[in-house]
Amino acid sequence: MERSVKEQQSIPVSKVQRAAKFISTGAKVGGNYMKHYAKRVVNPGLSKDELHNSNASDIYNSLSELKGSALKVAQMMSMDKNMLPRAYQDKFTMAQYSAPPLSYPLVVKTFQKYFGKTPDQMYDTFTKSAVNAASIGQVHQATKDGKTLAVKIQYPGVADSVSSDLKLVRPFALRLLNMNERELDHYMEEVEGKLIEETDYILEVERSKEISAACSHIDGLIFPGYYETYSAERIITMDWIEGKHIKEWLETNPSQEAKNKIGQSLWDFYHHQVHNLQQVHADPHPGNFIITNEGKLGIIDFGCVKILPQDFYKGYFALIKRELLINEEELNQIFYNLEFISDKDTEEEKVYFKSVFKEMISLLGKPFHVESFDFADDSYFEQIFQLGDRISNDKMFKKSRQARGSRHGLYINRTYFGLYNLLNQLQANIKTTKPEWLE
């Protein structure tokens, strides 16, 4: 399990060091644009592919070194496939699996800070190298009293730099996401709150135990046990789940039946959380799931949990009903409550935004309108991407004086896009259960 990856000996922790890294990356990106425009003088038909590839590499390499919120935002952007040019998606997807791990002395320092002991004093064995390194922390394998454990250690400085990092990532996000500033600020505020929660490992252990227990009856799922005496604000110790990430598992060429079974467990897991618990594991990227050798789906990360307020939940899913059997007055009220329209809008804007969001939600709701849905249908995803493209380039959105949509919608949309994406990767055909009131 040991990895021979180049390890990082230090992380830029101070605001000045982190800002300097962003500024030098900004300069590189600016240089890439200059090169691109110079080449276009000679070759006017030149596409932006090379520019996107250079920028994606430079930005990803810097974010990987900085880790934390900036890398997490890259990871989130790669999940929202319709947000970014393909070069960024491909590069930023790496944030879901691999960032350069921290060297062992930095790991020991974290243990001494929270336990006054080294890992060797706490566990029977502990891998000197990380077996997995992602945006906010890295994982080491350990053993204790005959049990194999996963020990997640948060990178130093991540929790303290969330707010300043997001301010620094803002210019990149504006340029890459094609959003107006009001929308981005609306988005960033919600992201900041969630990222601060994600750095609180005591909260994560609490939520992990609570949601695991509430979902333990669902067929085909497996959850690790958590060890509070070996966990702290920046360290989590849990059972090691042996298996493969979805991508690796798919490379073993599983049967359609096996893919459908994993897909069904995934759908049932999200269905129960959204409609019964009204709090949801809002980070459905492939790195958070393990498929065991027995064909069960392991859920290994509860860092990002979104609690759904009742009024938001009711309004959002009312719009997903197949036939919108709601009178105009009620419908208007839902659109106001979900902040798709407001009193600042002209009549023309109200008509326009209502029609766009109806289209968007009915497209997102398609799997809910049938008994079973084949997520291998790439044309469905093509429709989603085309709608995303159309919206992001639309003049009405660009000149809009306000952000569109409740901030609660950010994570629920992300959850469903992420879930659909995973089901598409699995090419799964599943029974799309829904709550009775939505039938």
Image: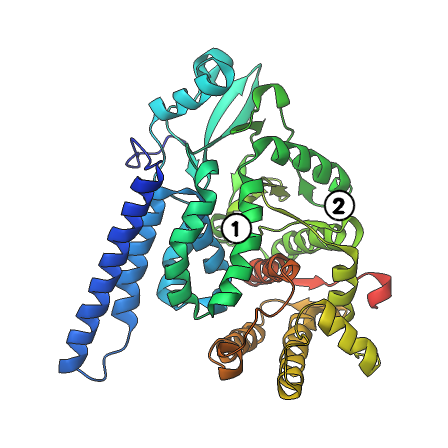
Residue type of the residue flagged with mark 2: Ile
Q: Nearer the viewer, residue 379 or 94?
A: 94
Q: Position of residue 13 (x, y in %)?
A: 35, 36
Write the residue at 35% across / 32% down: 102
Which mark, by number, is residue 286? 1
Write the residue at 15% across / 75% down: 38
- Image: 438 above or below 382: above
Write the residue at 54% across / 35% down: 242
Q: Is residue 149 visible?
A: yes
Which residue of the protein is positioned furthest toward the front in this rendering?
344
Q: Quadrant of residue 295?
A: top right
Circle 2 sits on which residue? 218
Give the distance between the C-alpha atoms of the residues marked 2 and 1, in whole angstroms.
Answer: 20 Å
In the figure, is residue 222 to the left or right of 106?
A: right
What secondary structure is marked by label 1?
helix
- Image: 7 above or below 310: above
Q: Position of residue 413 (x, y in %)?
A: 62, 62
In the rendered view of the protein, which quadrant contains the N terminus? top left
Write the residue at 46% across / 19% down: 113
- Image: 76 above or below 366: above
Q: Is residue 321 visible?
A: no
Q: Position of residue 380 (x, y in %)?
A: 58, 75
Q: Residues within 10 Å of mark 2 (few under 14, many from 20)?
A: some
Q: Nearer the viewer, residue 265 or 416?
A: 416
Q: Nearer the viewer, residue 404 or 61?
A: 404
Which mark, by number, is residue 420? none
Q: Quadrant of residue 140?
A: top left
- Earlier residue among tags 2 and 1: 2
What secondary structure is marked by label 2?
loop
